[in-house]
Amino acid sequence: MSPRWIWRGVNGLATCAFLFFAVVQWNDPDPVRWIAIYLGAALCCALELIGRLRWPLPALTGVVALIWIGIWAPRVVGQVHWGHAFASAGMSGNEKEEEARETGGLAITAAWSAALVVGTVTRKRYQHPFQPP
């Protein structure tokens, strides 16, 4: 199996994961912004899956996630035990644990966005000049 097919498969899984992340935000007290960031990440993955992604979109998604992490991190770093925050996917009622999980989701979004930027730039660089995208 070629690395390109593996990359496409992983992006298919990532698309599904980010769509799932968006769906489970409906019960959140502030769902719109969370659904938006996860749908943005899912869109990036889906576009990469079909070979139509350009690097500015995942770069923007990643930058938004990183800025958001910068805002949220001081609220959770040193305030919550990270292992306990991720021990259960359910709502524990502890606001700090919920914020820690949300920060983790943003970190996943930022990291995958960075991988997509590298993937799109690398694909374009090594693509034959007359080959369609």
Image: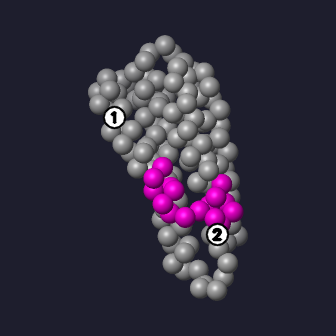
Residue span colored magenta: 46-61
Query: Measured along the vertical axis of the image, is residue 83 above or below residue 18?
Result: above
Residue depicted at 61% across the width and 54% down the height: 45
Q: Which amino acid does label 1 sit on?
A: Ile
- Disc 2 or disc 1, which is closer to the eye? 1
> Mark 2 or 1 closer to N-term?
2
Cβ atoms under marks 2 and 1 closer than 8 Å:
no
Image check: 109 left or right of 42? left
Percent of width and height locating residue 74: 29, 31
Percent of width and height locating residue 109: 50, 45
Q: Quadrant of the C terminus?
A: bottom right
Would you identify the image quadrant in which residue 88 lies?
top right
| Residue 111 seen in the current view | no
Residue 43 numbered tag: none
Would you identify the image quadrant in which residue 130 lies?
bottom right
Percent of width and height locating residue 102: 47, 31
| Residue 57 seen in the current view | yes
Give me the C-alpha separation between circle 2 and circle 1: 36 Å
Circle 1 is placed at which residue position? 71
Q: Which amino acid does label 2 sit on?
A: Arg
Looking at this view, is 29 or 122 the one in front? Answer: 29
Find numbered disc 1 in the image and state the secondary structure of the residue it sits on.
helix
Report if residue 54 lies within the magenta region: yes
Circle 2 is placed at which residue position? 4
Residue depicted at 51% across the width and 56% down the height: 57
| Crowd class of label 2 (few under 14; some 14 to 19; many from 20; radius 10 Å) | few
Q: In which quarter of the image is the N terminus?
A: bottom right
Find numbered disc 2 in the image and state the secondary structure of the residue it sits on.
helix
Query: Measured along the vertical axis of the image, is residue 29 above or below residue 35?
Result: above
Secondary structure mainly formed by the magenta segment = helix
Report if residue 11 lies within the magenta region: no
